[in-house]
Image (cartoon, rainbow, N blue to C red):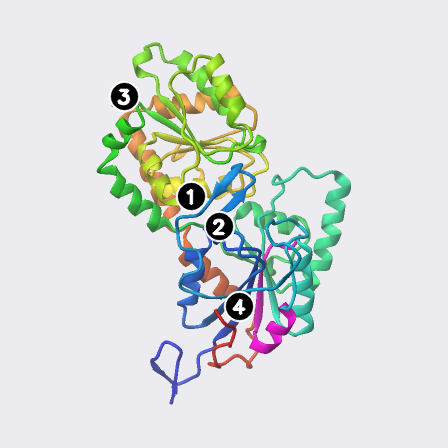
Amino acid sequence: MAINIAGHQTGETTRRYRVAYLVTHPIQYQAPLLRLIARQPDIDLTVFFETDLTVGSFRDPGFGQVIKWDVPLLEGYRYEFLPTIGAADSISRHRPLSYGFFSRLKRARFDALWVHGYARRSNLTAILVARMAGLKIFVRDEANALSAPRSRLRRIFKALFFRFLSRLVDGFLAIGSANRDYYLANGIDPDKIFLMPYAVDNDFFAERAAQTMRNRETFRRELGLEAGRPVILFASKFQARKRPGDLLLAYEQLLKKIPNSKDWPYLLFVGDGELRASLEDKARKLSLTHTRFLGFRNQTELSAFYDLCSVFVLPSTHEPWGLVVNEVMAAGRPVIVGSEVGCVADLVKPGHNGFTVRAGDIDGLADALFQVIGASSDQQESMCRASREIIHDWDFERDVSGLRQALKATFRDDDSLVAGPTNPAQA
């Protein structure tokens, strides 16, 4: 009688999928997911990073400053950093330039390669060498029809590229509806698409928001905010595509809709970046004295702001997903999100947990803000509850289920996968 991977007796041997995951660098959002996958009895995961740039202090060009993540990035799963040619202190389509991946695939006898992104040269090379080595290949990427401006010629090129890529790739791991539709529009067979949604550690943000709630009024006083006033929150990089200026102008219009200045909400900008100085200058010129610019805040600090806010706003354009929306919803808050943000089709239910607005529609954004801020306490609580309910199942467990479904479907007729030895890649 065989013993399966979980340690129980069974009449048949359990398959164990030996999966190599290639990604440019340790990502704060992904680390909890990788730990969860590594605990699965049927998935033997090794992560290959092309640079350790984000492990220590590093300069983030989007925030325009040196930061260091305050959550563990490398704990709880097997990983290896690939050697590189030249500097590995920046991430672009062509850098870092790593090598040695093919020999590692052969040495560890992997069954499948999962690649994060298909546009980078090193990722395409990895796909090709994995195909030469006989591995099954899975791609996860963020793109959707609105995530980047594309000319007609570029769209034609993309369709041709996907026709080529589809011959190499066994499964596309869609992060959401917009991403799935993008694959379908570019000719990918629907049977090759598996949902592996973009998620965050819901429990982390929900539990921390619940903890900070006990000190909410103390935190409010530390920020110099008067008790009882609503709070509008923007927390992201101050970049043009995030459109923080739209929120500032919509906030100015919102105040005109509220006759009593004692009822005016605060507008908090959490983050940093190239537009900060111009935003602060505009807020001064418009005499928006209830606006606060609070700088970059790390992962463990954000939940206090999520708990404090009455509504969160992300009016971006060309935003592939917007994981900060997941975080806020896990903390149980309404959201107002730009219609070009990738998550809206799956996470934002207008009138239930918030609203969507067209990019650049200042009047529409002001109206949405007024509907949330002006809602009754029962209506606001209903929106908070709806956010928690919607995000509840959009989680890492669903990611693991999607990855497992892709593996099982691809290896359905392959009897070579059994409870084999753990691969020898070193952590």
Residue at the far left in the pictured view: 214
Residue 249 at least partly seen: no
Numbered disc in front, either 1 or 3: 3
Determine the residue positioned at 57% across, 70% down. 112
Three-letter amino acid code at disc 3?
Glu
Of the two numbered discs 1 and 2 on the same chain, state the one appearing first in sequence: 2
Determine the residue positioned at 69% across, 59% down. 165
Between the C-alphas of marks 1 and 2, the distance is 9 Å
Tell whether label 2 touches label 1 (CB within 8 Å).
Answer: yes
Q: At numbered mark 3, what does the secondary structure look like: helix, strand or loop?
A: loop
Of the two numbered discs 4 and 3 on the same chain, state the one appearing first in sequence: 3
User: Within the image, what quadrant is residue 76 found in?
Assistant: bottom left
Between the C-alphas of marks 2 and 4, the distance is 18 Å
Between the C-alphas of marks 4 and 3, the distance is 54 Å
> What residue would you read off at disc 2?
198
Determine the residue positioned at 26% across, 23% down. 228
Three-letter amino acid code at disc 2?
Tyr
Of the two numbered discs 1 and 3 on the same chain, state the one appearing first in sequence: 3
Foreground of the two, 35 or 219: 219
Of the two numbered discs 2 and 4 on the same chain, state the one appearing first in sequence: 2
Residue 109 in magenta stretch: yes
User: Within the image, what quadrant is residue 130 found in?
Assistant: bottom right
> What residue would you read off at disc 3?
226
> What residue would you read off at disc 1?
326
Tell whether label 3 touches label 1 (CB within 8 Å).
Answer: no
User: Within the image, what quadrant is residue 41 found in?
Assistant: bottom left
Three-letter amino acid code at disc 4?
Leu
> What residue would you read off at disc 4?
407
Magenta-colored span = 101-119
Numbered disc in front, either 4 or 1: 1
